[in-house]
Image (tube, grey):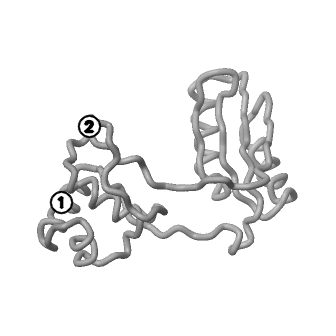
Amino acid sequence: MAARLDDLDRRILGELQDDASQSLDEIARKVGSSKTPVWNRIRKMREAGVIRRQTVLLEAEALGLEACFFVLIRTSEHEADWQARFLRAVRARPEVLEAHRLAGDIDYILKVRVTNARAYDTFYQALISEVKIYNVTALLSMEEIKFTTALSLETEAGRPPAATSGGARV
């Protein structure tokens, strides 16, 4: 069930997504409130599970992780034991940034970040040694056109909340 948020909650979340390192005073000033109500709302949204955690975003290329692959996986195995082994293998691989089970012709898609094609092959060889996979297609991303972790904070009326300056940091 979706949490019930008012406009002030949404503006606070927008500020946190933009830059969670802001002080409570800064956030309160930007959303037109005072520090204590802002803190109480943030606390309540954490308790309600709206705010999962705060973290920092790293620049992958600055760390030498220059290759991003989208890995499409089809399997002929659909038993619970295979799925458990596959999920363990995927969750244990630090190269896997995201993994999704899909509807349609492709069973799973992985977003994998590595240094280069050779590192991807090492990842691939390790994965197929752990679990049987029917078909794997790896697509190299040539350019990241958009990246954000910011979620849309539209109101119930379908209007976007007050604008924030951009990039997600929550």
Dot 2 amino acid type? Glu
The Cα atoms of the two marked residues, 1 and 2, are separated by 19 Å
Q: Residues at badges 1 and 2 in contact (C-beta under 8 Å)?
A: no
Q: Identify the mark nearer the N-term, 1 or 2.
A: 1
Q: For the residue labelled by badge 2, is the local secondary structure a helix, a strand or a loop?
A: loop
Q: Name the residue located 82 percent from the left edge and 48 percent from the top edge.
A: 125
- Which of the 4 quarters of the picture holds residue 37? bottom left
Query: At which x and y percent is residue 87?
Result: 59, 40
- Which of the 4 quarters of the picture holds residue 66? bottom right
Seen in the picture, residue 105 relative to 137 is either above or below; the reply is above
Q: Which residue is mark 2?
A: 156
Dot 1 amino acid type? Arg
Query: At which x and y percent is residue 139?
Result: 79, 43
Q: For the residue labelled by badge 1, is the local secondary structure a helix, a strand or a loop?
A: helix
Name the quarter where the C terminus is drawn. bottom left
Q: Is residue 45 left or right of residue 74?
A: left
Tell which of 50 and 14 is nearer to you: 14
Tell which of 47 and 168 is nearer to you: 168
Q: Name the residue located 64 percent from the left edge and 30 percent from the top edge.
A: 82
Q: Name the residue located 79 percent from the left edge and 53 percent from the top edge.
A: 142
Question: Which disc, if any, is residue 41?
Answer: 1
